[in-house]
Image (spheres, grey):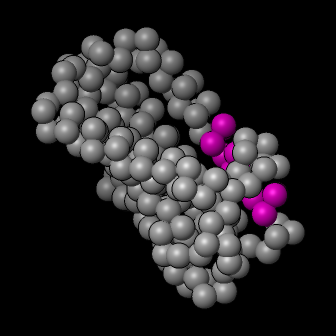
Amino acid sequence: MSVRFQIAPWLIILIPFAILAYYYDSLANPVLIARSFFGDEVTVAPKSLFTVFRVPLIEVVCAAIIEVMRRKAERANSETVAKYYLFWTILLYTVALKSLLQAVETVSPKSFTDNIYYLTLATVVIGISTAAIAGRKLLSNLKNVTGKFSPLELAALAVLLIAYLGLAFAPLYIFG
């Protein structure tokens, strides 16, 4: 796999930070922090660095979890390793595009936000479906592909899970 292909999703994940920083002063107060599944109910919070940059931070945490998993294939033949890596790479690109679209939604005029929300939802559904199709044989035999996790990998995954839960759900209880 080329270095550009490996770095590209991480560069895409950084773009939302630049977009949100550039438009920060012009963002409305309060800011949207969550939508219901169909987008009709919203949760808002006072504009702050945390509430504005929360979603890209969540996506960085998700991408880091994916990166730990993507690098995990140990005891498998090269074809299986390639499929496993493809599965996680598709999910990594999905997270990157989701983050970019959500940043665009945040800075867009209200008249466009619903369309961007549904485009984001479609991107996630397509990305997960594509990954599931690419990794359909691997998912039933994941333990044989990943092997055992090292203590460092387990610790990293535990810290990332706690970070995700804190970033994703705590604000909903605080502001919801």
Q: Position of residue 100 (x, y in %)?
A: 58, 62
Magenta stretch: helix, strand or loop mostly: helix
Residue at the location (45% across, 32% down)? 87
Q: Position of residue 5 (x, y in %)?
A: 40, 53
In the image, 133: left or right of 64? right
Q: Is residue 100 above or below residue 19?
A: above
Observer-nearest of 115 and 74: 115
Q: Is residue 148 above or below residue 1?
A: above
Q: Is residue 77 above or below residue 114?
A: above
Q: Position of residue 67 (x, y in %)?
A: 33, 44
The residue sitting at the right extreme is 111
Magenta span includes 117: yes
Residue at the location (53% across, 76% down)? 48
Observer-nearest of 172 and 104: 172
Residue at the location (36% across, 34% down)? 85
The residue sitting at the front extreme is 174
Image-quadrant location for residue 74: top left
Disc tally is: 0
The residue sitting at the bottom extreme is 25
| Residue 102 visible in the displayed image | no
Residue at the location (14% across, 39% down)? 152
Magenta span includes 89: no
Q: Position of residue 11 (x, y in %)?
A: 43, 65
Quadrant in which the N terminus appears: top left
Residues drawn in magenta: 113-126
Observer-nearest of 6 and 121: 121
| Residue 26 visible in the displayed image | yes
